[in-house]
Amino acid sequence: MASSCSTTGSPGSPKFEKIPGTSIRVLRSVPSVRRWRKPLLLDHRSVALVPTMGALHEGHISLIRAACRENHHVVVSIYVNPAQFGIAEDLDSYPKTWEADVAKLVALDREMADDGGSYLGRVSAVFAPTTGEMYPGGFPGQEVNSKGSFVTITPVGEVLEGKTRPTFFRGVATVCMKLFNIVQPEKVYFGQKDVQQTVVIRRMVRDFAMPIEVVIGGTVRDQKDGLALSSRNVYLGERRRGVATVLWRALRAAEEGYGMGMAGRKEILGEAEKVVREVEEEQGRLGPKERVRFEVDYISLADPDTMEEVGVVDRRRGAILSGAVKMLRVEEPKEGEDLGYEGGPEVRLIDNIILKPLE
Ligand code: AMP
């Protein structure tokens, strides 16, 4: 980590860490963010926050670009938040790629410096706190009944992802409340990719009267096959990566049904189920050295504001099609096969499509 940060400061001024070759500060403590933030408030400079867990990819970068177009200063937070991982989940193995993340921010900074007029501001700071800084009361509990200072947004945080991952949105809302209080941004940027998260955050900001605008950026996908970019895709390996588009293809089929005039839940989701069955059958015909196994956790057709399931889509409101699929471990690796990061553990992928109002 030390190699990609330098410490500078004129005599008498507090020293601060910077990403070399840029003016991006690396802030690690709450007081250092407050010191950085205060003069910007007095100067009426707008500040935006893009919260991430690192392992940056084009999905993150597109949010950072959007934030830099619309704000004078952008803070990117990089923090793998333990409270949003269940006890049996991948907190320990979650990819941590600080050097590569810094390299991406440097490249982006150069590109923006060369760009005449598209951006109002630049990434001014990376906030990369320790867990001690974020959770002064101690390591946050990961059990459903853990005690602590948590923010819960229900019932929207209890359905869909919240059903399979009962502590997930509590962790997300809690860490975002902390980040928002620390950075005090005017705008925060989140990705459509995690659609239920956007609904939870919007609800939190509304219900706690936080003076923040929530901006949602579109999902960035692999140009070739449409798979939504995700930090977890590195776990897949080539074999599973090829089949991981099943959810996206299923959602697209359901979207087409809606576009052709379907409104009933059974009809629309039936289109998605057909695609899932086809892929299952295709894989079922292969042997264990070739095939990929997966389990669909859910495919949902929900109200855009509450994420509650709908029986019939109100064409004036539209709906959210979303789903989650578990890509199971490869049963029998071929000799020398690259199974993915950390030996290719089970990976849970999510995706969604917004069905826009048609009337
Ligand atoms: P994460 O690091 O996974 O917590 O994601 C940080 C932010 O990036 C969240 O607001 C995500 O919704 C967003 N994000 C992740 N993947 C994508 C993607 N493929 N397209 C757009 N935004 C994304």
Image: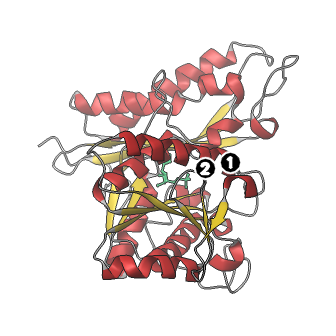
Amino acid under label 1? Glu
Q: Quick check: 106 above or below 332?
A: below
Query: Is residue 149 at least partly visible in the picture?
Result: yes
Residues under labels 2 and 1: Cα distance?
Answer: 5 Å
**Residue 90, above or below 85:** above
Q: Is residue 103 left or right of residue 358?
A: right
- Please tell me whether mark 2 sits on a helix, a strand or a loop: helix
> What crowding class fits label 2: few (fewer than 14 Cα within 10 Å), some (14-19), or many (20 or more)?
many
Image quadrant for the N terminus?
A: bottom right
In x, y percent, where is residue 359? Answer: 11, 43
Residue closer to the observer: 329 or 104: 104
Q: Position of residue 63 (x, y in %)?
A: 41, 50
User: Which amino acid type is marked by label 2?
Assistant: Val
Q: Can you identify the residue that label 1 sits on?
A: 99
What residue do we see at 84% from left, 22% from top?
Answer: 333
Callout 2: CB less than 8 Å from ligand 1: no
Q: Residue at x 46, y 25 (%)?
A: 274
Res. 102 mark: 2
Please identify the quarter of the rendering in which residue 71 is found.
bottom left
**Residue drawn at (46%, 33%) of the image:** 221
Would residue 166 be seen by someone viewing this image from the given angle?
no
State the residue at coordinates (57%, 21%): 279
2 and 1 marks in contact (CB < 8 Å): yes
- Residue 211 screen position, x and y as percent: 31, 78
Name the quadrant containing residue 12. Answer: bottom right
Residue 30 versus residue 331: which sits nearer the camera?
30
Residue 321, position as x, y percentages in the image: 38, 43
